[in-house]
Amino acid sequence: MAAHRKPRHSPLGGPAVRTAATLALASAATATVFEGSGHAAPRPTPAQVKADVDRLYEEAEVATEKYNGAKEQAGQARAAFDRLRDEAARRTERLNRSRDALGAVAAAQYRSGGLDPAVQLVLTSDPDQYLERAALAEKAGDRQAAAIASVRRELAAVRQLRARSADRLRELKAHEAELRKQKAAVRTKLDAARALLARLTAEERARYEAAVTAGRHDAASPGPASGAAADRADRASADRGPLTAPTGRAAAAIAFAEAQLGKPYVWGATGPSAYDCSGLTQAAWRAAGVSLPRTTYTQINAGRRVSRSELAPGDLVFFYSGISHVGLYIGGGRMIHAPRPGAPVRIAPIDEMPFAGATRVG
């Protein structure tokens, strides 16, 4: 009886089931495509791109000032390390001369038939042994005692200098590590800003760049034909504006800044062909005979704080809560500053950014 039964079809096999499975997979794939399409991020508007780019550039400027500070500190640590290393070399040379003098004494004693134990000890290859048993120097004669004391002084000085050099070297390496960190942060922010701008159409991008060059906030409005036009407008505005500087140094700083109008912004640059914001103000006041520190957050403490109502041409004006941007005030509510990548040194109203404070340095 069992031999005549019809074979059962497995529920996991057969043409019909395979066809159904194929259709199901195709349906799932189609659904995935449509679902992905339905949830694709909408293309940002020019205004949204501008807001994000502005934020990234502000963050990049914060990182730039930290980079500038780390670079300055690394430079100072390098100079200090080099000075200590040079001094250690000079002291080592003096130590060797003192040891040579003792060698001459030893040779004379040897020729006369004896070598003082104290001299033997100083000439040993292990100076530490000598220092631990320095009392033996008292057994030497006056000449030997003076020479041995000289060796002791120089040896102690060399050791101290080498220890200080090691500390400076560790400090230098820490500053260099911070320098690399901030450099990477700046590049990351700028790369992100460029990637956002690349999402604009050619026309939108040109309109945005024209607005930035001209110093306008509305990226959708038409701008001048070129940066040269904006530069000429800035110079004409400077010529018309009241520039009654309170001191000759302030006038010299402003004159220098005016001569830089139209030069590009490059982060970390201090001139003469390009500047970042604090690099420009530092160079302007250097031309007037005043030395400013490198960063915005140190420049703000380089002089006497003044209120916005007290501003006079030549004052440094600072922006944002983190004191991440600085310009040189020229009067009439305007300043000369190096804004950001893509925007050259130009004249702008000080209410273009959130005002944070001002300092009078000369």
Image (cartoon, rainbow, N blue to C red):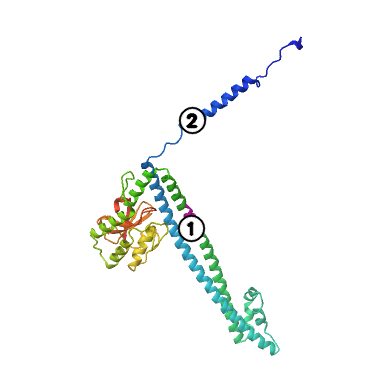
Q: Which residues are the magenta region?
A: 179-185
Gap between marks 2 and 1 measured at Cα: 45 Å
Secondary structure type for disc 2: helix
Question: Where does the image place residue 12, in percent across and percent down from the top left?
Answer: 65, 22
Q: Is residue 48 magenta?
A: no
Q: Which residue does the numbered mark 2 point to in the structure image?
A: 35
Residue at label 1? Answer: 179
Circle 1 packing at 10 Å, graded few (<14), some (14-19), many (20+), is many
Instruction: Give me the residue at 26% from left, 58% from top.
Output: 236
> Label 2: few (<14), some or many (≥20) within 10 Å?
few
Query: Residue 17 lies in what quarter of the image?
Result: top right
**Quarter location, residue 97:** bottom right
Q: Is residue 85 left or right of residue 354?
A: right
Q: Label 1 sits on what residue type?
A: Leu
Location of residue 130 in the rendering, given as x and y in whole percent from the top left corner = 64, 76
Amino acid under label 2?
A: Glu
Q: Is residue 304 above or below residue 48?
A: below
- Tell me, for residue 337, which label it has, or none: none
